[in-house]
Image (tube, rainbow, N blue to C red):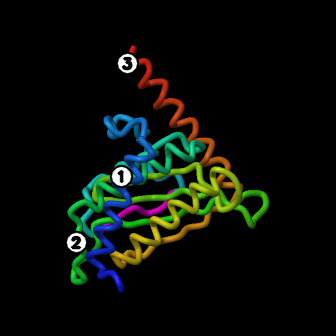
């Protein structure tokens, strides 16, 4: 028996909801307070949408090297974006998905950044790779979710490749930005 697109869409929402619950994102109760806001897109990529707010805020959902928290954070944001979304073939999608491949010294290996672009906000998750280890598992998980969203909603998953020389500098700048955000948050809480 083949599932209809509507059944698959509902299944995806339940999947994301269950996955987010199972993973127990440590910041689920205060999502908006745990994303480091960046000044501009770290890789200078375009983030516009046909229905975009005048100003697009860009956030790291977690420290770029922390796979599990990054995956969880982006799944929660994706779940929010999909709630109540019913694709209209005559209209443009209210969000975009992109995978950014940052080349490593070995050009066959990449650090991966997954991006959800919504009206007014872009959420970026790192800590993933296309090779072994925890980062590889996170990369496979988010790739599979993006593929599922693409199939169900007809949204093309965009891809961008960043050369290793530029990628190393940008990744360090993102780690520094998240460290500053964490320090400011701790100082504010004290």
Which mark sits nearer the N-terminus, 3 or 2?
A: 2
Pick out the residue farthest to the front: 1
**Contact between labelled residues 2 and 3, with CB atoms less than 8 Å apart:** no
Q: Which mark is residue 169?
A: none
Q: What element carries label 2?
A: loop
Q: How far apart are marks 1 and 3 (CA)?
A: 24 Å
Counting from the top left corner in percent of width and height, residue 133 is at: 69, 52
Counting from the top left corner in percent of width and height, residue 61 is at: 44, 45
Which region is colored magenta?
A: 44-49
Q: Name the residue under label 2.
A: 86
Q: Name the residue under label 1.
A: 77
In magenta stretch: residue 178: no
In magenta stretch: residue 45: yes
Kindly report the secondary structure that dominates the magenta region of the rendered protein. loop
Q: Which mark is residue 189?
A: 3
Q: Which residue is drawn at 48% across and 41% down?
A: 62
- Which label sits in the foreground, 3 or 2? 2
Q: Is mark 1 on a helix, strand or loop?
A: helix
What is the quadrant of residue 136 in the picture? bottom right
Q: Quadrant of the C terminus?
A: top left
Q: Is residue 31 above or below residue 13?
A: above
Q: What element carries label 3?
A: helix
Q: How far apart are marks 1 and 2 (CA)?
A: 17 Å
Counting from the top left corner in percent of width and height, residue 22 is at: 42, 47
Bin the neighbour count of mark 2 within 10 Å (Cα to Cα): few under 14, some 14-19, many 20 and up.
few
What is the quadrant of residue 104 in the picture? bottom right
């Amino acid at each position: 028996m083949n599932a209809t697109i509507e059944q698959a869409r509902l299944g995806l929402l339940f999947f994301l909801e269950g996955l987010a619950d199972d993973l127990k994102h440590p910041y689920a109760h205060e999502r908006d307070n745990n994303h480091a806001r960046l000044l501009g897109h770290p890789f200078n990529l375009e983030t516009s949408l046909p229905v975009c707010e005048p100003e697009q805020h860009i956030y790291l959902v977690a420290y770029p090297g922390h796979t599990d928290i990054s995956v969880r954070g982006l799944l929660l944001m994706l779940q929010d974006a999909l709630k109540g979304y019913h694709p209209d073939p005559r209209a443009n999608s209210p969000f975009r998905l992109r995978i950014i491949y940052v080349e490593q010294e070995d050009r066959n290996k990449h650090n991966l950044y997954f991006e959800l672009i919504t009206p007014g906000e872009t959420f970026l998750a790192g800590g993933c790779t296309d090779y072994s280890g925890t980062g590889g598992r996170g990369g496979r998980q988010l790739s599979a979710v993006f593929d599922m969203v693409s199939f169900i909603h007809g949204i093309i998953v965009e891809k961008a490749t960043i050369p290793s020389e530029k990628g190393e500098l940008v990744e360090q700048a993102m780690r520094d930005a998240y460290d500053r955000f964490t320090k400011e948050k701790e100082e504010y809480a004290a």
